[in-house]
Amino acid sequence: GVGMQAMRGVFLARAASAQTSPPVALTRFFCVVSPLKQSPLARRSDFLNSDPKFQPSMRRVGLSSRQTFGRVPGDARGITTRLAGSDAFNLSDAFDSVIKVYTVAASPNWFMPWQMKSQRESTGSGFIIEGRRILTNAHCVADMNNVMIRKHGDPNKYSARVVAVGHECDLAMLTTDNEEFWEGTQPLSLGGIPELQDPVAVVGYPTGGDNISVSVGVVSRVEPQQYVHGATSLLAIQIDAAINPGNSGGPAIMNNEVVGVAFQSLEGAENIGFIIPVPIIQHFLKDIEVGNNEYTGFPALGISCQALENSQLRHFYGMTEKETGVLICKIRPLTDSYAKLQKHDVILAVDDQPVGNDGTVAFRNRERISFDYILSSKYSGDYIDVKILRNKERLTVQVAAKPLQHLVPIQQYDLLPRYLIYAGLVFTPLSQPYLHEYGDDWYHTSPRRLCDRALNMDKTEEDQELVVLSQVLQDKANQGYEALCNLQVLECNGVTVKNLKHLAALIKEGEAGNEAFQQLILDDNRVIILECQKAKDCHAGILLRHRIASDVQL
């Protein structure tokens, strides 16, 4: 949900990369030059800070740690590393299952959607699991053109293909059809969630060398964190092992089992790294198994809640002294919650787990965690039992949880931008990647009105989009309209514009009709009038001057 109140004691994941003086910054470990502009809109969390500027920003820069066991020779056998006060790790059997990922990728240019940005080369890590599959991070293969993989101690690289990818949870599945690659490999098995202070070893191919590297640390914290790549809040494990650029996708191992996948860290702090825990990995694996390698995503209730820590507030809504819960403030349209829950219902329990006044539920040994954690174990279409207090009556409602549909898409990896060019006017659906083109400080530098709509508006119809006039490729036919960029297109020829395809159809109808003009109404009732014949005459010349191969991509 969006626009929700923050709760005490819980790290909240709605953050903006735009900050004047960020105290810390979450970092994604991947050897890539260009920084990631993350979204301030987390996709799942039902308790979020409504102001992104109070949250840490995210960048790709890695941080170093005090304890790294460096490069291991290709013929190493029986090597062990030891953490003070713990049993030795015997990782030699795991080395052959940890692979290096080489990626060549190119991202779209969202300002000029008919072009791609320059190619970039990067490396990451991964590991083999059962079924001849390789697990790595989604950001290691996002917008990829080519992927190669290499085993430990093998001088050869093998061509790989992406089987499935879940950008929300930052996980991807690779494989290769080369039989030679699989010779001598053994899949790694998945374990469980480690306890606090349990020792873990992170294995991968970080920057600073070409061979495999091992770093050791302990589990510091287990709770939801913001995933920088997918701009979502999911369960994560904080460790103090060294995780550096290139470690992304590598396994975190304890007792010869994988307990997580390295993916990001906290910049500006000492030895704070994060790994994706096994429950999130298993959710991804089952999701793509059921969906035939198509990723569905983590479901959500689609509600915004307020903590009920004030006794007067609880008394007003009829809660007893022993009852705890949170207050529903907003419900997204197009969700099952919109039909079954009401504003100012009090959520007392979720799946029979009492919800605290701060929005947390019990978790393991005297730990507490946001009740979002319960949803992370669900799949699209699963029902959740929600016990509520409504008008001083206690009810239990079954709500179907589904992934949220955002009016303005948060991430658009592996997709080409959609656009329409007419008489030099470039139209495109509003998306957060479009706003990210304004730089790392996009929250402050992008058009304020578009940024507010991207963060706060909800989709009310299935096919609804916000279509904006991105830019004007100047010509005599559109002279004087260049100041109207970055305004939403509200109407075309007297008809409300639903989405980009609808706008293209309305313009085509205008050309086919007997009308001599096309009329566009933008924000603030700004008007654009184009003569159909002049628009038709100048169109081909504009495309030729700007070397645009196609005037439409829907």
Image (cartoon, rainbow, N blue to C red):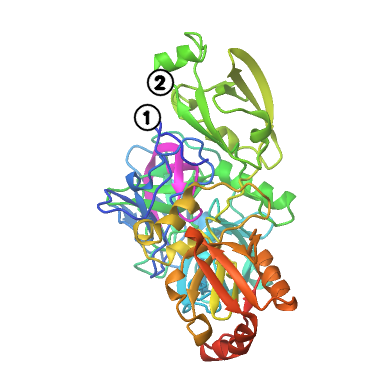
Q: Determine which residue is flagged by label 2.
A: 309
Q: Residue at x 45, y 62 (%)?
A: 435
What's the mark number on residue 145? none
Q: Is residue 448 left or right of residue 132?
A: left
Q: Determine which residue is flagged by label 1.
A: 8
SS of the residue at dot 1? loop
Q: Is residue 400 left or right of residue 411?
A: right
Q: Residue at x 70, y 57 (%)?
A: 293
Q: Are marks 2 and 1 in contact (CB under 8 Å)?
A: yes
Residue 125 x, y percent position in the rendering: 49, 62
* Vertical order, 40 against 85 (above or below): below
Q: Is residue 264 left or right of residue 94?
A: left
Residue type beneath disc 1: Arg
For the residue pair 242 and 522, the one nearer the viewer reads as 522
Q: Is residue 328 visible?
A: yes
Residue 259 x, y percent position in the rendering: 51, 44
Which is more N-terminal, label 1 or label 2? 1
Residue type beneath disc 2: Glu
| Residue 224 within the magenta-colored segment of the rendering | yes
SS of the residue at dot 2? loop
Residue 348, image quadrant: top right
Residue 204 x, y percent position in the rendering: 45, 59
Magenta extent: 214-237
Q: How crowded is the residue under tag 2: few (<14 C-alpha within 10 Å), some, or many (20+)?
A: some
* Outermost residue to the left: 21
Quarter of the picture holding the C terminus? bottom right
* Vertical order, 508 against 238 (above or below): below
* Outermost residue to the top: 321
Between the residue at mark 2 and the residue at mark 1, the CA separation in whole angstroms equals 10 Å
> Predominant secondary structure in magenta?
strand
